[in-house]
Amino acid sequence: MAIIVDKVQKRKDIALSCVELFTQSGITGLTISQVAQAAKIGKGTIYEYFKNKEDIVFEILNVLMLRHNEQKIKKLSGVTSTKEKLKIFFDFFHNENDIELRQIYKEFLSINLSNPNADMIEYQTKCFNTYHLWVEEIIQEGIQNNEILPQATKLVKGLFALNEGMFISSVSTNAIDDLEKEINDYIDALFELIEVKK
Amino acid sequence: MAIIVDKVQKRKDIALSCVELFTQSGITGLTISQVAQAAKIGKGTIYEYFKNKEDIVFEILNVLMLRHNEQKIKKLSGVTSTKEKLKIFFDFFHNENDIELRQIYKEFLSINLSNPNADMIEYQTKCFNTYHLWVEEIIQEGIQNNEILPQATKLVKGLFALNEGMFISSVSTNAIDDLEKEINDYIDALFELIEVKK
DNA sequence: TTTTAATTGACTGATGGTCGGTCATTTTAA
DNA sequence: TTAAAATGACCGACCATCAGTCAATTAAAA
């Protein structure tokens, strides 16, 4: 036997060492040689830890997402109002702190749209379900606290898709200059209809 | 002088001649040589009419979109109910007839997400504005006909983003198996809240 | 015959991914 | 104790592919 490295950890390390490279140049504007250089390893070594270039984006997203989710839990813990909770939950799509993550998410989505891959689809499905469950819990609490009407459940669940859609539009058009305002205004308008009037 | 070809028309012809190729293999699984072969022209000729591979997708989308919009106008012309109009308007994302268009739209979005290009962004912006105006008109008519409440305007406008988001999810996850049902159910739920009760 | 737009496919440069080989460490057995 | 054997980690020269270029060719019009 010889040295045994923690493959899982090293995969993460390599991924993290080139986050900046990916967020700045994007996957298409980037060569494996550059990535190897940034990670200070040989080109061949990359392929000991990743299936292909896309797989690196996948790992970066994984790491950043995990980090993001932990921070989100913290951010949400102190908040009680349902409306506020939702606004914070969806700030992923415009928050200053998550610019890097969004950049990687864009790359990831791009891959998923033109190069679907079972692992990535599965990961997206897991995220989708987790987040929907999360939103559902927020809504249920809101209903129990008599903040919002029960029949609003379906509408609020659609918020996730709405946010994703607005994000895509904000990124692929010049039509949305203030996504934060757009999203928060929408939530306000929605609550006009579903809030329990006191 | 020699032959003068209609560059604009030939661009369309080439694009149309390889729609199937693109919808089947996607842009990444496709080489320029294959495209040239399908179009029965030399490889070099492609570059007389297109900036690059992505530009071909752009042109295909253009042609199919134009066709789609004309058909949409026809489909909408006979309908009077606002709810029905919206359902038909948004059937773009699941309609059997538009599978090809959606496939190309996916490719286009993918390019737009990882390789933004001024022309494509501008085109997307134009589409975005056109469609939003369209939806807005449908809503205004609904309000004037006393079908829906005026304060619903903002919510219904968000439908566009919601549909786009659901579409993205349906394509990049396994979590949505019947997008049509999902969308129509949402519209029904929305109308529960914004419909004028008689 | 001349002119010139249109066409072309051989060619080039770049790059993603492979593979044979080297190196460093651990195991083993003399 | 030691050195040979074993093996996993690492590497970069190499290969195949392919997007995009360009010099040569074709053919219609003048």
Image (cartoon, coloured by chain):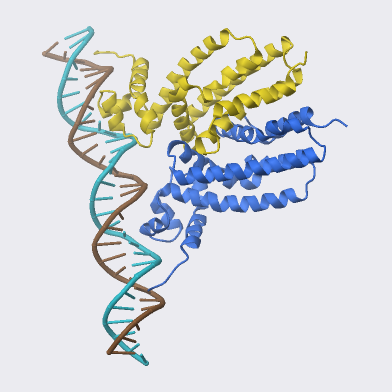
Chain colours: A blue, B yellow, C brown, D cyan
Q: State the residue lying farthest toward the right.
A: A198
In the rendered image, is residue A92 in sight?
Answer: no
User: In the rendering, at what x and y percent does residue C13 appear?
Assistant: 30, 44
Residue A3 pos. (x, y %): 41, 72
What is the count of numbered marks? 0
Write the residue at 53% across / 40% down. A106
Report the residue at 45% width, 44% height from top: A118
Quarter holding residue B61: top left
Please state which of residues A180 and A72 is positioned toward the viewer in this rendering. Answer: A72
Can residue B66 be seen by looking at this rendering? Answer: yes
* D14 versus A182 height, above or below: below
Left or right side of C29 for B106: right
The answer to whether residue A105 is left or right of residue A176 is left
Q: Nearer the viewer, residue A26 or B133?
A: B133
Q: Residue A45 in the image: x percent, y percent?
A: 38, 59
| Left or right of residue A14: residue B186 | right
Q: Quadrant of residue B147?
A: top right
**The quarter of the displayed image where residue A80 is located:** top right
Residue B8 position (above or below residue A44): above
- Between A92 and B171, the residue placed more toward the observer is B171
Residue at image position (47%, 26%) is B102
Looking at the figure, which quarter contains the N terminus of chain B?
A: top left
Where, quadrant-wise, is the C terminus of chain B in this rendering? top right
